[in-house]
Amino acid sequence: MLSQPLAEVLRPKKLADVVGQTEIIGENKLLSNIVKNKTPLNLIFWGPAGTGKTTLARIISRELEANMVELSAVIAKKEDITNIIGRAKVDWNLGIRTILFVDEIHRFSKAQQDTFLPFVESGLITLLGATTENPSFEIINPLLSRSRVVVLKALSDDELKIILKRGVKALKAKIEPKAVEFLAHVSGGDARSALKNLELAANLAAGAKITKEMAEQAAGKKVPVFDKKGEFHFNLISAFIKSMRAGDDTAALYYLARMVEAGEDPKFIARRMVVFASEDIGLAGNGALNMAVAAFEAIERIGMPEGGIVLSHVVTALARSKKSRETYDAWQRAKELAHKTSNLPPPLHLRNAVTGLMKDLGYGKNYKWEPGFKHELSNLPEDIDPKTNLF
């Protein structure tokens, strides 16, 4: 067996070995450019657990040949920061850069964050922070303004399979394809969790091939029948939307629970609710959109399982709300008309006369800047019937 946890053994040492996060790693991408050009930058890594925040911080520090100091905001005190600053000043005089990595930086109080702000600003330390919480709410504005927020995404099942196969090789184990599928799916985008479950399953197998049943036992649960890319996934979300549309709050809540229990991304559900609030409720309930957006923001801020209470609350409200497709249908007609007439200029009287020549040409002619003003001419382009009504 391995002397270290499997996740630690497989922790990438260079960006080329990192799986996923292709929006920030790769040719001309942010992190790759930092490493390539040796240009330190204050970064706040924001993303779910097991997506590589600590790994990326260590890779950057190694590539920049800096002295990396790791600090956990859960247990750190103000004095710890003071000591780090003192050592950083000594290293600075020796020509050595200090990178301070603060894990769970959102746990630091404003006073603690203020402590190292001047040294971040002066360049004495380069700050790399990691958080699972929205930095907009948890990090002080002066620190945010001097840092770049880097968003990390939960790993896909396919990306987790790549990592799991590396783990199988490191363990010198054998595994059924269905067990790999299961471990990837049940881990919810968390590489650390996937490798921990794999290691437990290998222990249960004791040299035999790892089966799906062993993987389920290691993970401590079974995944409900739910394929995020398959028909069942789309059938559930369709049933969820159509139940709200029909005003059936019981069915809507049932399908919500089905998706949550199956491990669906709650932000995906909340996004669909935001769309539903405009598409199906629209002008019939002007508070619906605000409520749906608030639900999405609440999910971002508090996560699950408490976020399920918020989703339940808002789903019930949306299902019970009056429905109107007026603005949705008008928007479809507006897009169709715009597509057919995309080359038509706005009428002269609606254009700003910013020069004397424009005024002479009739720009803004007879237009009055006053509430409710209606010009004698149509506000639509000249070649569109002025009686056109999209509603």
Image (cartoon, grey):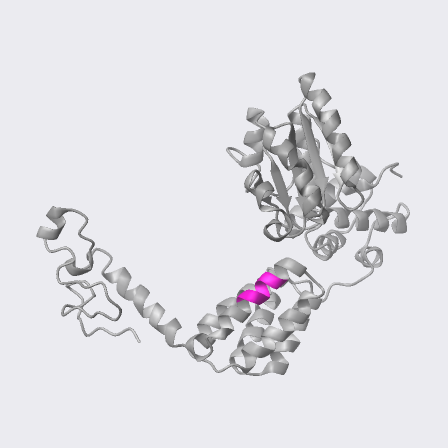
Q: Residue at x 25, y 74 (%)?
A: 389
Q: Is residue 55 visible?
A: yes
**Camera-side residue of 201 and 295:** 295
Q: Position of residue 152 (x, y in %)?
A: 61, 46
Residue 382: image quadrant is: bottom left
Q: Position of residue 272 (x, y in %)?
A: 54, 66
Query: Furthest-top residue in view?
Result: 94
**Res 51 visible:** no
Q: Is residue 87 above or below residue 327?
A: above
Q: Is residue 232 left or right of residue 375?
A: right
Q: Residue at x 51, y 69 (%)?
A: 290
Q: Is residue 270 above or below residue 96?
A: below
Query: Outermost residue toward the left?
Result: 360
Closer to the camera in the image, 358 or 197: 358
How many tags in the picture?
A: 0
Q: Main secondary structure of the magenta part?
A: helix
In depth, the one of 346 and 142 nearer the eye is 142
Residue situated furthest right in the rendering: 206
**Quadrant of image for the C terminus:** bottom left
Is residue 129 found left or right of 386 in the rendered image?
right
Start-end of magenta stretch:
293-298
Q: Is residue 231 magenta?
A: no
Picture quarter with the N terminus: top right
Residue 295 drawn in magenta = yes
Q: Residue 28: image x %, image y %?
A: 50, 33
Residue 196 in the image: x percent, y percent? 80, 48
- As drawn, is 389 to the left or to the right of 327? left
Residue closer to the observer: 337 or 145: 145
Q: Is residue 289 above or below residue 248?
A: above
Q: Residue at 83%, 46% (x, y): give it.
A: 199
